[in-house]
Amino acid sequence: MQLTMLGVGSSAGTPVVGCQCATCRSSDARNKRTRCSSAITFPNGEVVLIDTGPDLRFQALREGLNRVDAVLYTHTHADHLHGIDDLRAFCQIQRKQIPLYGKADALAHIADKFGYTIREPSDFWDLPVLGLNEVKAPFELFGQTVTPIPVKHGYSDILGFRIGNLAYLTDVSEIPEASLPLLQGLDVLLLDCLRYKPHYTHINLEQSLEYAAMIAAADTYLIHMTHEMEYAAVSALLPPNVHVGYDGLQLHFE
């Protein structure tokens, strides 16, 4: 399977509007970060998104993404949800409903705020055509097992996901003890890393490195970073098996 990092930025993206810091003015493409999302291509070609951030249209054009077969939602903050309207293009191309997967509270939020997208297929494709599927336990999707990973995001209970030997954990303030066994034996871990200083709803660099060492994936990639995190500067601080993620990075896993 292949994962493409569509975006590894925080809610403001990088560059930040109006900012003149070194990261925002950098010419290194790895410092240009859209809002956090990834696309996973399954063995038979199906494409599954993790979240639909507000940059989805731009990300899809940049990566040549021309199909989406399902979406896994970690949670429903705007920077992870508000590109949901851009799923319309994929519904139009494929002429089929796209299933959404998430916790009950996340699906209720989507139904309340974007209820016009929750529809059965018909002869009209002028709106997204989406279906809701509650995640309570591991489930099968296109021949692969998707395992939800409960994590804390401040006071909120949200989800990460494990597919095969890859796990995706964004917007994490704490990984509960009960979730750690679900993260054993990973080849690839994508892990939240907001900034240098502590934050009440996200882990910082120090905490990310502590969790990376605890989970001991073969390779860990840092995601959901603010403009404080300049690519080369952060890379210089990392052990050999921890890397700074960047938009467009592609990883292969089993």
Image (cartoon, rainbow, N blue to C red):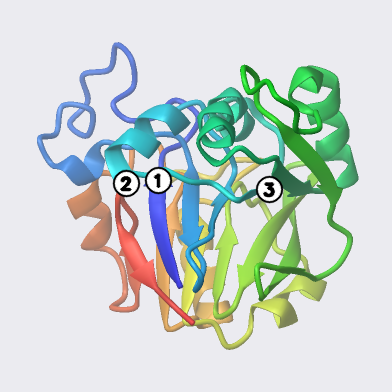
Residue 183, x across and y down, in percent: 65, 78
**Which amino acid does the dot numbered 1 rest on?**
Leu
Instruction: Categorize mark 3 by other alpha carbons within 10 Å: few (<14), some (14-19), many (20+).
Output: many
User: Disc 2 versus disc 1: distance between alpha carbons?
Assistant: 5 Å
Which residue is outermost to the front? Answer: 123
User: Disc 3 versus disc 1: distance between alpha carbons?
Assistant: 15 Å
Q: Say which residue label 3 marks.
A: 74
User: Disc 3 versus disc 2: distance between alpha carbons?
Assistant: 19 Å
Q: Say which residue label 1 marks.
A: 6
The foreground one among 215 and 86 is: 86
Q: Nearer the viewer, mark 3 or mark 1?
A: 1
Which numbered marker is on residue 247?
2
Mark 2 vs 1: CB contact within 8 A: yes
Q: Earlier in the sequence, mark 3 or mark 2?
A: 3
Residue 100, x across and y down, in percent: 73, 44
Instruction: Categorize mark 1 by other alpha carbons within 10 Å: few (<14), some (14-19), many (20+).
Output: many
Which residue occupies 49% across, 81% down? Answer: 217
Q: Is the residue 68 above or below the residue 150 in the image?
A: above
Which residue occupies 17% across, 41% down? Answer: 29
**Which amino acid does the dot numbered 3 rest on?**
Thr
Which residue is outermost to the bottom? Answer: 185
Residue 80 seen by the camera: yes
Residue 240, x across and y down, in percent: 28, 78
Element type where label 3 sits in the image: loop
Instruction: Categorize mark 2 by other alpha carbons within 10 Å: few (<14), some (14-19), many (20+).
Output: many
Q: How many marks?
A: 3
Q: Earlier in the sequence, mark 2 or mark 1?
A: 1
Which residue is outermost to the left? Answer: 27
Residue 79, x across and y down, in percent: 56, 30
Element type where label 1 sits in the image: strand
